[in-house]
Image: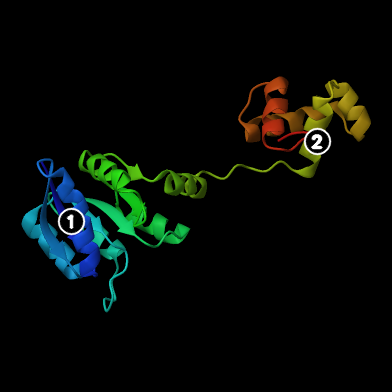
């Protein structure tokens, strides 16, 4: 049985979420509702729900669902927090996840997606809608070091089948300099061979005709 707390400042939203979840009566129990950040934290402390469905913004409340999430996650034991909101900006998503939210759903998500997310959050798994997951991964992915214009020239020449000596001659460089550029290229593209470097460069659209 998953014990749930619904935290949202709109009574009609709380009623709607409760109605959707009660379709799974026997698997879930809504143990409380909160209309403010303070209520969400206090009820989480008192009721120990497994999952808190958390809105991000509360009318007439200076604090946000992110603040509530951070406090709830610091409780002993902490409840899991599943954000259910209308706001989908990158900054909102990142702040919620950084505060400890186990998932992030938009209020227009299909009922089946909500129930699946509740089950995932209750089990300790991350519950993100595909659209949110894609945006989050793009945002938090480590930056890929860019090739310099000269390195692009070098890998472009290598892609035509030229040897290091040929590349050096065509770019008016020493062969040692070409080798040095290739070492940097391999490192930046995270590859270990000329063939792999050319393939990776094509994948990233660095070569003419590449995607």
Q: Please, which residue is most extreme toward the left here?
A: 46
- Of residues 130 and 138, the one nearer the viewer is 130
Q: What is the secondary structure assignment of the residue under circle 1?
A: helix
In front: label 1 or label 2: 1
Tell me whether the residue at label 1 lies in contact with that at label 2, contact meaning CB atoms closer than 8 angstroms: no
Number of numbered discs? 2
Instruction: Note whether 166 is above or below 62 in the view shown.
Output: above
| Circle nearer the N terminus (1, 2) | 1
Q: Position of residue 84 (x, y in %)?
A: 30, 56
Image-quadrant location for residue 209: top right
Using residue 90 as the reference point, say whether residue 62 is left or right of it. left
Q: Position of residue 79 (x, y in %)?
A: 17, 50
The label on residue 18 is 1
Image quarter hosting the N terminus: top left
Image-quadrant location for residue 207: top right
Image quarter hosting the C terminus: top right
- Of residues 10 and 167, the one nearer the viewer is 10
Q: What is the secondary structure assignment of the residue under circle 2?
A: loop
Query: 10 Å neighbourhood of mark 2: few (<14), some, or many (≥20)?
Result: few
Instruction: Note whether 184 is above or below 53 in the view shown.
Output: above
Image-quadrant location for residue 9: bottom left
Instruction: Note whether 199 is above or below 65 in the view shown.
Output: above
Using residue 37 as the reference point, say whether residue 162 is left or right of it. right
- Of residues 72 and 15, the one nearer the viewer is 15
The residue to which callout 2 is attached is: 208
């Amino acid at each position: 049985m998953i014990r749930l707390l619904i935290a949202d400042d709109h009574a009609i939203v709380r009623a709607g979420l409760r109605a959707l979840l009660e379709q799974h009566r026997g698997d879930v129990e809504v143990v409380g509702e909160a209309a403010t950040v303070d209520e969400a934290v206090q009820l989480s402390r008192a009721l120990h729900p497994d999952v808190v469905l958390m809105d991000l913004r509360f009318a007439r409340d200076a604090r946000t669902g992110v603040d509530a999430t951070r406090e709830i996650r610091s409780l002993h034991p902490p409840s899991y927090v599943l954000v259910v909101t209308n706001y989908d900006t990158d900054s909102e998503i990142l702040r919620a996840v950084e505060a400890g939210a186990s998932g992030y759903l938009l209020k227009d998500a299909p009922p089946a997606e909500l129930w699946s997310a509740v089950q995932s959050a209750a089990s300790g798994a991350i519950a993100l809608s595909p659209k949110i997951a894609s945006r989050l991964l793009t945002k938090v992915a480590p930056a890929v070091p860019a090739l310099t214009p000269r390195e692009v020239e070098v890998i472009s020449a290598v892609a035509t089948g030229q040897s290091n000596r040929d590349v050096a001659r065509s770019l008016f460089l020493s062969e040692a300099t070409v080798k040095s550029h290739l070492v940097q290229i391999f490192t930046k593209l995270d590859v270990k061979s000329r063939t792999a470097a050319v393939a990776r460069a094509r994948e990233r659209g660095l070569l003419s005709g590449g995607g």
